[in-house]
Image (cartoon, rainbow, N blue to C red):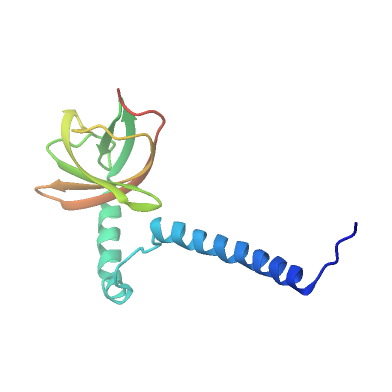
């Protein structure tokens, strides 16, 4: 027996088709809303007002020739700070904000302790994954400097 395709069948097919499309769009919008906002600065106008000042500070920092390298050792971030003559710098106050590149939900503030000449280690371990390490270095004679580097942690510390 052959069934006839009626207008009701077509209406049901169209409703099902567009229902699936709309449902997927709603689901994707919800997932996107719960993940990274894409917000880099809260107020772009204020950020633009500070651009010249920030650029000047960056040029002054670059002129000092300090370099920072960061590695992860046993789940802790270890930074090494060298001056223009490749000599380690001691007696610094080092802190950092560890951020995930795609979300603000897991940002962590870390303090560092000096563990050797020019080497500073975070007091707390970090979880596995990709992190942006936004390091602030304070020195009595040189003021504050900022370095941003990306690190990858393969396994969480045990």
* Residue at the image position 30 percent from the left and 65 percent from the top: 55
Give the camera-side residue of 21 and 144: 21
Residue at the outermost front position: 1
Residue 11 in picture, x, y percent from top left: 71, 72
Where's the C terminus, which quadrant? top left
Q: Position of residue 62 (x, y in %)?
A: 30, 53
- Left or right for 156, reference 92: right
In the displayed structure image, the side of residue 93 where residue 33 appears, left or right:
right
Residue in view at x 22 percent, y 34 percent: 88
Q: How many marks?
A: 0
Q: Quadrant of residue 128?
A: top left
Please, which residue is most extreme toward the top here?
158
Q: Quadrant of the N terminus?
A: bottom right
The percent coordinates of residue 130 (x first, y second) are 40, 41
113 left or right, relative to 45? left
Q: Quadrant of residue 10?
A: bottom right
Horizontal and vertical percent position of residue 54: 27, 65
- Residue at 39% of width from left, 61% of height from top? 37
């Amino acid at each position: 027996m052959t069934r006839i395709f009626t207008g009701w069948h077509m209406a049901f097919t169209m409703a099902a088709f567009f229902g699936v499309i709309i449902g997927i769009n709603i689901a994707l919008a919800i997932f996107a809303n719960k993940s990274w906002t894409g917000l880099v600065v809260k107020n772009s106008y204020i950020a633009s007002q500070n651009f010249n000042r920030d650029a000047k500070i960056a040029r002054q920092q670059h002129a000092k020739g300090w370099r920072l390298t960061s590695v992860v050792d046993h789940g802790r971030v270890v930074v090494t700070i060298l001056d223009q003559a490749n000599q380690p710098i001691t007696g610094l106050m080092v802190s950092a904000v560890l951020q995930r590149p795609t979300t603000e939900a897991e940002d962590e503030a870390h303090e560092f302790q000096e563990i050797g000449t020019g080497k500073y280690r975070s007091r707390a371990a970090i979880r596995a994954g990709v992190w942006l390490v936004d390091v602030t270095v304070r020195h009595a004679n040189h003021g504050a400097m900022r370095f941003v580097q990306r690190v990858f942690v393969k396994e969480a510390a045990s």
